[in-house]
Image (tube, rainbow, N blue to C red):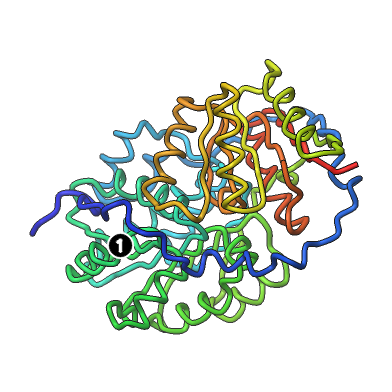
Amino acid sequence: MPYNSFNSRRPQRGGRYNTNRPQRSNSRRGSKENINPSRFIKAAKVVAESAPYEAKHTFNDFNLESGLRTNIEAKGFKIPSPIQDQSIPVGLSGRDVIGIANTGTGKTIAFAIPVLQKLMTDKTSKVIIMAPTRELAQQIEDEIRGLAKNSGLFGALLIGGTPMGPQLRDLSFKPRIILGTPGRIKDHLERGSLNISEFNMVVLDEVDRMLDMGFVDDMRTILGLLASNRQSFFFSATLDHKVNALIRDFSADPETISVKSGDTTDTVEQNVVTYSSKSQKVDKLHDLLIDTKVSKALVFDETQRSVERLSNDLIARGFSADAIHGGKSQGQRQRALNRFKASQINILVATDVAARGIDVSDITHVINFSTPQTYTDYVHRIGRAGRAGKTGYAITFIEA
């Protein structure tokens, strides 16, 4: 069956949640890092205004296939962001790209345009795109679908929390775009429903988070099965030794482009709230949430059960809230996230799965109702606030 746009037949939502590899970060439970409470207290930095970035290109300057150019214009894109301005020309030239940039800077467009240009002009090219969470994979899919409209390209979204049937059906069409989480992609490789030996492009988005989540072995397995002559895109917020080791082993002469401006948490005002009992803890959370400064809050708790219970408690107290955690189907998670994005609710209670998948620009407060497993998890959590140049607030509950 012909398709006018990328993956117009979306996988069905729902089904019993498959405790897939993205849940492996929970294996750290029971060995929680002892974090000094003082590390949860930090004033937001006042960032001096700098001269606005002057892009060297417009989107019209890029030599792109006409259909891709039409879709870019339809989205209203005119001036690229810094990471787009510097990465797109390198990607279009065929070089490997390492892009270092803060979350929310337009990284998806930075790799999507070179990838789609090659797919549209070289019918033998295929790409696999990996992201750390289902939510991020779906966000990338939405962007690519818009840019690939009327291209005839077809893709398969391979994520947990959805039935295998629709994914197997999509794979039977031999898609040239595979997008998903490393765990579910590896599941398909192991069952023989996916062969990536001819895929000559690969994108790893948020590499540092995938490594933090324990995907390193899956990623290495997948990268080792791709075509040896390929173009690679690695995008990350940090470039530590773990990220460097992966890139060194699976990339040829990459060009590094860094447009990161400060740490993700620099614009977040961080403080603690002390409590002495469970009832006092919930009451203090109530008092915090009724503050008029709390426009949209992401509240973290430790387990699926505690998240569900806290969400229900807040709803019973009259708050507009919902819950998101690994025990819910992908459809349930997506509906809760969509309601949060659309401000139909202003409180989302979550396990750490949300820290690595939520892209909501107007979150004002991140509240750690339970302390995180590690300080890295804490940074990922509070990085959901203070975006787009705004000051965010992070409050962590500490037992007195």
Disc 1 packing (10 Å; few <14; some 14–19; many ≥20): many
Residue occupied by mark 1: 163
Return the residue found at the far top. 292
* Screen quadrant of the C terminus: top right
**Left or right of residue 4, residue 270 in this image:** right
Residue 261: x and y in percent read 71, 44
Q: Is residue 246 above or below residue 373?
A: below
Is 55 on the left-hand or right-hand side of 273?
left
Identify the residue at horizontal 40%, vertical 35% (top origin): 77
**Element at badge 1?**
loop
**Residue at x-position 59% and y-position 42%:** 309
Q: Is residue 96 left or right of residue 170?
A: right
Question: Quadrant of the rendered structure where residue 369 is?
Answer: top right
Q: Is residue 364 visible?
A: yes
Query: Residue 283, percent across and down?
Result: 74, 28
Looking at the image, is 164 positioned above or below residue 374? below
**Is residue 267 in sight in this rendering?**
no
**Count of numbered tags:** 1
Residue type at mark 1 is Pro
Seen from the viewer's position, the closer of residues 340 and 305 is 305
Image quadrant where one finds the N terminus: bottom left
Q: Position of residue 304 (x, y in %)?
A: 57, 52
Residue 227 in percent (x, y) is at: 38, 81
Q: Measured along the vertical axis of the image, is residue 249 above or below residue 328?
A: below
* Residue at the left extreme, as displayed: 1
Please tell me which residue is depicted at 72% across the width and 49% down the height of the picture: 379
